[in-house]
Image: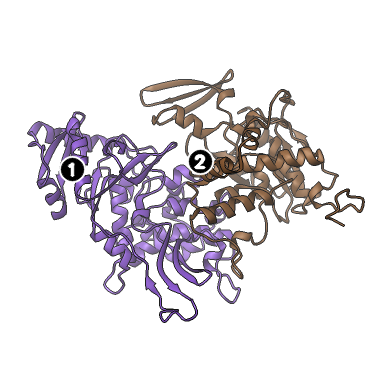
Amino acid sequence: MQAYTEKIQEAARRLLADKQVDVVIGFRKGTLPFMNEPFLAKNADQVRKLYWDSNCGINLANYLSKRTDRVAIVAKGCDSRNIVVHLLEYQIKREQLHILGIPCQGMLDRRRILGALDGKEPVGVTEKDGRVLVSGAGFEVALDRQEYLQENCAICTHRNPVIYDELLGEPVPEQTEVDRYEDVRLVEAMSAEQRWEYFDNLIKTCIRCYACRNACPVCFCPTCFVDESRPQWVGKTIDPTDTRTFHFLRAYHVAGRCTDCGSCERACPVGIKMRQFTKKMEKDIKELYGYEAGVVPDQRPPLDTYRPDDPQQFIK
Amino acid sequence: MMEIYIAKEKFPGFVEKLMGQQRVFGPVFQGQYHEFAELKASDEIDLSYQNTRLSPKGLFHPHSERMFQYSLATGDPEAGIVKEAPKDYSPRVILGIRPCDAKAFRLDDANFDTETIKDPWWTRRRASTILVGLACNAPCRSCFCTSVGTGPFDPAGLDALLIDVGTGYVLQAVTDKGKELAAGLAGGEAVAPAMTEQVAQLKQAAEAQLTIQFDPKAIADQNMLELFNAAFWDEVQFSCINCGTCTFLCPTCWCFDIQDEVCNDQGDRLRIWDSCMFPLFTLHGSGHNPRNVKLQRVRQRFMHKLKYYQDKYHGGVACVGCGRCVKSCPVNIDIREVARLMSASCVCPA
C-alpha cells in the first residue's frame, strides 16, 4: 500500500500546478506507529508530506462537509462511499471534487496489534508479503496482515472506490465470501433481557467524549442533538441512562447512511464496539430495502424518500 | 530520607494491611487497558502497567458528580433548599500512581485550591488521600515528562514513592503522611547501600530514555498575541475532529459544566466534565459563541496548557508529559509537535 504515496504526491502536484483544485486532502505520516494524520496540502511544499500506508483508517469524507473550494481527496472504498453520501445529502458538490481513488486491502487494527504485543512498545513497522513486521526494544514479531485488519475491513465488500476521477492503482479483488452479520445475528438471537445487558456492557466504559460521533463522516448536523441546550435533549453524565440515550440515538441517526467505515471504533479512546449498533441498522436497511449506503450516487436513499404507493399504512 | 525495602512476596500482605486500614485504589487491568479502581482484593492491583488509559483525576474530580440535591415537592417545608449530596471522604491510599499523574494534581490545585477559592470536594478529597507513587523504570515512547518539569522518579506530587528494584520495592517516604504510612508497615527491611545505588542507576536509566522534546521557557518568552495569531494554527487544526478525547484523558484538564436535572419533584445539581473542544463550551446565552470555529477551540487548548498557564501562574506548563493525548488522539495530533511550533522563534503570520 505504501506504493500509493508516490502516486498521491504526483497527482496532487499536478492538480495543484494545473490549478484544477485549490487543496488536496490526504494523510501525512503519523508521529506514532499505526497512526497517520489527516492532512490538507495547499502547495508543492506540503505535497511532499502526503503519505499512504495501512494506517489511514480515518474516513477523509469527514473533512469535506460544507467546503466551498475545489478539493482533491484521496479516497479508499469506504471514503468514496461516504463521498456519495455527502453528495446525496448536499454536503459538497460533485463539480468541486477531484477524487483520487485508492483500491484498498484493508486498514490495520492498531488496538489489536498493540494488544498482541502484550505491553511491548512498537518502534519500527514494515509490511512485506502479507505480513506486518513490528519491532521494538528487544523484540521483533511478524503478524499476519489479514488477521489484524480492522474488523470492518475484514468484512468489507467495497474495497474499490465506487466513485472517482482517477484510480491510483489496479482494482483489487472484492471479498465475496464474507458473512457481514454473524455477530448481529448472535445479538438478534438473545432475549430482550440478555440484549439489554449486552448493550449495557458494551458501552459501560463510555466517557462521553464523542470521538465516535466526531470521527463519523455522516455526523455533520450544524447542531448535534447532544449539543442542543434549549431544551437539552440528552443528559451529559455517565449514568447508564444518559450513555444509552446517546449511543442508541446516534445509531438510529446514522441508519441507512452508515457505510461501516469503522472510524467510530477506530477513534474511540476506550475501545467501545459501537458498530454492533450500526451494523444492525445496516442489516435491517439491506433486508427491508435492498439498499447499501453510499454505493449508488444517483438514487435517493430509502429513508429520505416518500412514495405515495408505499405499502405501509402508517405513512398515509 | 526515610526508606524501606519490601520484598515482592511480602507486597500482597502490605496491600492487605493498607486495605484493612482504609480504602485502597490502584491500577487494575479492565479487559483492554488499566484503570484506577478501588481494590476489592489485594491481587487486583497490577503494578506491571505502564500508564492507565484515563488519568486518575476522576478520583478527585469525577466525570459526573451530584454536588447538591433539592426537593421541589409541594408542601415540603424544605422545598427549594439546595443541600449537599453525601460524599465519601473516608481516608484512602492511591497506590502505584505514576509521578506525572501525581504532579498533575499539584497543577490542578492552581484551579481548585487557592488563597481565595477552595473547591470543597477537591480539597477534602486531596486531604483524605495518601499518594503512593510508582517510579517509571521504562517510560513510554509517547512520554515527555522531563520536557515539562517533572520526571519518571519525581517525588514532587507524592507522599511516598515505590521503586521496583526487581526482587522488591524500595519505598521512599516524601511527606509526613508518607513517613507515617511507612512507619506503620510491618515486614519492611532496611535498604542496603547497594540498593540505594541501584535506585540511582534506575532513575538515571529511565531519564536517559526520555529526550527533551521542547522548551516550555521558549513558549513563555513568546509574545502572547503573536502566538495567538500565528499562521501554524491553521495547519494544526485541520485534522482535529473536536472530540473530547484529549481533554477527558488529560490529568490537567479540569473544566466542568454545572447542570440541574429534575425528575418529578427531586432535583440534582450535577458537575460534569466539559471540554474546550466542544462548541457548547463557550456558547453564550445570547447565542453568540466567541469560539465558534474549530481553529479557535484547538488553539485554546494548546494556548491554555502551554502559554496562558505559564503566564498566569509562573510555574511551568499545565502538562505533565503523560502522553495520553498523544496516544489516544483519533487523528494523531501530537502536543509535542505543536509545542515545537509554538516555541519556534518566528511565529508571525507570513
Looking at the figure, which quarter contains the C terminus of chain B? bottom right
Mark 2 is surrounded, within 10 Å at the Cα level, by few (under 14), some (14 to 19) or many (20 or more) other residues, namely: some
Do the residues at discs 2 and 1 belong to one chain? no
Residue at 58% across, 54% down: A246
Q: Which chain is purple?
A: B
Provide the secondary structure element on which disc 2 rests.
loop
Q: Is residue A38 above or below residue B247?
A: above
Residue at 73% across, 56% down: A68
Mark 1 is surrounded, within 10 Å at the Cα level, by few (under 14), some (14 to 19) or many (20 or more) other residues, namely: some
The three-letter code of the residue at mark 1 reads: Lys
Can you give x and y, in whole percent of width and height, for residue B247 in the image?
45, 54
Residue corresponding to mark 2: A271
- Asked if residue A171 lies left or right of residue B78, the reply is right
The three-letter code of the residue at mark 2 reads: Gly
Q: Is residue B185 above or below residue A176?
A: below
Can you give x and y, in whole percent of width and height, for residue B321 in the image?
36, 48
Residue A19 seen anywhere in this rendered image of the structure: no
Q: Residue A286, located in which quarter of the rendered image?
A: top right
Provide the secondary structure element on which disc 1 rests.
helix
Can you give x and y, in whole percent of width and height, for residue A203 in the image?
52, 46
Residue corresponding to mark 1: B17
